[in-house]
Amino acid sequence: MRKGQFFIIGAIFICALFFFGVSPVMKISKSPADDMNFIADNLQKELPHALNIGVNSSVPVDTAYGFMNFSRDTVLSKGVALEAVWVIFLPINGSINASAGNLDMPGTVGVNVSGTYGGIYVGVDSVNSSVFAVSEPVFNVTVTVSGESFHATLLTNKTSIYSTLSLEREGNTVRKEILA
């Protein structure tokens, strides 16, 4: 064999090593909001569980408030801002105690229970409540937050929650509504 043939065979061998030894580069593109969708879905699943823990401990309002504060602090460490408003409907001896809370969005939450309207003012990072008389086994409720209304029919013997939440980072926003 000649000297040039060794160089050609060596070059082919080196090329084969590079071809088989280097894995192809795969670019996985994701939307900047994908993780926020995951967080929002998780909050949508976990808030009702937190409420149930609170009901079982006889402190549903405090538990939901603590869960929402914990969630806000957790997602903030990921650079995501969480704004949330929630209303807990707690049955108490022929009436419904509607407790509204929020994170970082002071204002009035409109609550209409079977035709009786009550505006519940909630300051930043706080909870406030109002009591509505209910005589039927079910009641209709309308919750109005920032001009948007939500309607539902709820049971008077069950603690329920309605929440709207918004996650935002770098111009991307994910919104969810929760009813449980």
Image: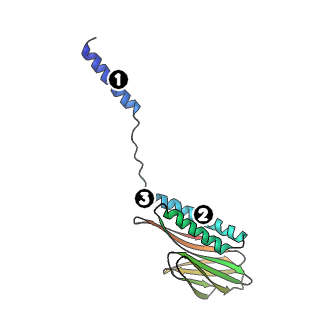
Type of amino acid under label 2: Lys
Question: For residue 45, which numbered disc appears in the image?
Answer: 2
Residue at 42% over, 58% down: 32
Above or below, 161 against 23 in this view is below
Quarter of the view holding residue 100: bottom right
Residue at 26% over, 12% down: 2
Disc 3 secondary structure class: loop
Q: Earlier in the sequence, mark 3 or mark 2?
A: 3
Disc 1 secondary structure class: helix
Neighbours of disc 3 within 10 Å: few (<14), some (14-19), many (20+):
few
Residue at 59% over, 88% down: 117
CB under 8 Å between discs 3 and 1 = no
Q: x, y percentage for residue 54?
A: 68, 70
Type of amino acid under label 1: Phe
Quadrant in the picture for the N terminus: top left
What residue is pinned by disc 1?
13
Q: Earlier in the sequence, mark 3 or mark 1?
A: 1
Q: Is residue 53 left or right of residue 9?
A: right
Question: For residue 163, which numbered disc appears in the image?
Answer: none
What residue is pinned by disc 3?
32
Q: x, y percentage for residue 152?
A: 61, 77
Q: x, y percentage for residue 43?
A: 57, 64
Alpha carbon distance from label 3 to label 1: 43 Å
Q: x, y percentage for residue 75?
A: 51, 63
Neighbours of disc 2 within 10 Å: few (<14), some (14-19), many (20+):
few
Quarter of the view holding residue 119: bottom right
Above or below, 27 against 22 in this view is below
